[in-house]
Image: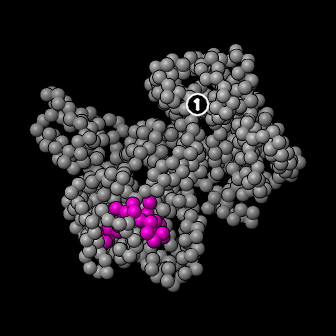
Amino acid sequence: MDFTPKNTPLQTPFTSDVNINQIQSQTQPHTHTQTQNQVDNNKINKLKLKVKDKNVNYRSSSFDIPGLTKSKKSPYGLLTNDDIEKKLIIVMCGLPASGKSFITNKLSRYLNFMMFNCKAFNVGNTRRTFSKENKLEEQTSDFFNANNEKYLQLRDKWALDTLEELLNYLLVKDGAVAIFDATNTTKERRRLLFQQIKNRSNKINVVFLETICSNEELTKKNIKLKISGPDYIYKDPVDSLIDFEERLKNYKKVYESIEDSENLSYIKMIDVGEKIITYKLNGFLTSETLYYLMNFNLNERKIWITRNGESKYNLEVKMGGDSYLTKRGKKYSKALKNFIDDQKLIEQNNYKIKSDETQKKEYLRMIERYGENNITIDTNNEVEEVEEEENDEFHIWSSMRKRAIESVQYFDENKYQIKQIRMLDEINAGDFDSLSHSDFKEYYPIEFEKKQNDTLRYKYPGNGGESYLDVINRLRTVINEIERLKDSVLIVTHPVPARVLLGYFLNISKDIIADIDIPLHCVYCLDIKPYGISWSLYEYVEKLDTFVQLPQNSINTTKVKEVGLVYKEKHYSEIPTKLARTLSNENNCSSLIHRSVSFDSLVDLPMSPNVNKYIIKKNKHLHTMPLSRKPFTKDDFEYLK
């Protein structure tokens, strides 16, 4: 079947039982002594017998979705080792610089976000580790010549070692999906891998995912990324480019695109989703994978995420509800509209302001607001009419809560695609809806403790009560729609959905997304590039009635490990962290800055480089604090979000 993704707007109403913690991977024998190898291999071989399909009678069962399904053996809907027929191996295929690792990373991020434990296994990493530990000679383009029999056998060994590690992850450990990231460009290599998998498990589902890049410009960009990768680090860029192009020629000589005659389930992804071809696909996780792949695009765009303006319940510190905006909240809504208008203008004109007097004044106004680095001016004397591009729409999405709808009421429907989406509603607190946080803690201490101990899985009791898992699942459609969009979008939502969205796009572990700081009257900007995402935070300054971008070093952040990566398994990112979590350690507050304080506690705080003190509420009196002082403690504050 051929699939061509259509550009249509969103329209919708709405463990392992075996303990092997002490067993090291069989795929890394070079890191252990021979004696330890024998012991570990014997243990793994015994465990293999437990998962060998021909020795175990498996019963076919329906799909599992974490957070939406449950059974006696899996209360949270996670796949167990009894669900081998539901697990999935994705074998990547394609020439170097065709986008395999990019697709692998995005797919792994999505599946992990959907609570299906997913890990990528990269043969290149195995090669580099083995070469370093065994002091092999440098691997130039000659190493990848198919006529080099010596190295060909070694490359096959690395591939099979990596595959064995992958199979242990799925069949012995707690993996649900594993991605085998390598070129696998020949029929013989694919046959070898498929046979090796079936020797371990006849039930597990295997799909080959081939990436084909016919766009020369895109290939050139991919090559630039490759020569800055681990194989060419600290090497001359020109020499690296020559070597990589020779390597690419060696692969092209033996390259065989996957065919129906191989009798393998496959997906062909051409030009990162411009065209998709499938053959013999089945299984729930396979369909999830295909659905996600069909929404890929490499367009540069921005995703703006903010909470609604201040509402009555914000002042009363109550959960949920459907209250209206306060006077300050409406003022924020007007400022938000003006801010996004300016950002849309900058984006549509491709950061160019023409040289006539009217537009020069507009340019100077934007310079004053947002800084010269974000805007450039075209000094050409001839004033040209800027043609609107086909994809210059800007979407405004809000939840269906009154406070969110009011927050977008000033946007012009003739300029923006405005839509209310129920999936963006705040988490449903069930019986505790409209209850204050302090009353929840005081009168329902058992429920409060349950929530504190497992924020991700805690489900509010009562009709409609939700957990973070429920919010993750209902945002699945929204995330796929954002991935499909080629335009920028402003999302006006609430703390929990905002944390989930930031957690997905910033590749943050689900277990800590509840710690992401979503302050009132601030806007997160996610800058989507073809091969990466960067974030920034803008804060509304009420006294100046404008937004300012906060420097990263002035935001309370935490370093967290990114999940599911191919090349950078130990890569850490900084995320904005709620101060309330930090204050659990009495004096561990040295990184506190003004924006980490509740907006309800700020009084006429001017934002300028000359600000040298905070004015906050303390015991119902105004209190001034200098920026340079000893670390703050929780006694300094009346209330923290």
Does residue 478 show up? Answer: no
Q: Residue at x 48, y 45 (%)?
A: 483
* Residue 72, image quadrant: bottom right
Residue 526: percent from the left, percent from the top? 40, 48
Q: Is residue 433 visible?
A: yes
Q: Quadrant of residue 349?
A: top left
Amino acid on which disc 1 is placed: Thr
Give the residue drawn at x 23%, y 54%: 609
Q: Residue furthest right?
A: 55
Split into 4 quadrants, where in the image is the N terminus?
A: top right
Q: Nearer the viewer, residue 52 or 214?
A: 52
Residues 40 and 289: in front is: 40
Where is residue 610? Give x, y as percent: 21, 57
Asked whether, in this view, residue 186 is left or right of residue 453, the answer is right
626 relative to 115, above or below? below
Q: Label 1: how many residues lie within 10 Å, few (<14), some (14-19) or many (20+)?
A: many
Residue drawn at the location 49% of the way across and 19% of the way down: 239
- Looking at the image, which residue sits at the far left? 357
Give the residue displayed 80% in from the left and 44% down from the top: 36
Q: Position of residue 208 (x, y in %)?
A: 67, 35
Residue at disc 1, secondary structure: strand
Which of 283 and 349 lies nearest the eye of the viewer?
A: 349
Q: Is residue 135 above or below residue 460?
A: above
Decide whether residue 578 is among the magenta residues.
yes
Magenta part of the chain = 577-602
Residue at image mark 1? 211
Instruction: Name the residue at the bottom extreme.
Output: 443
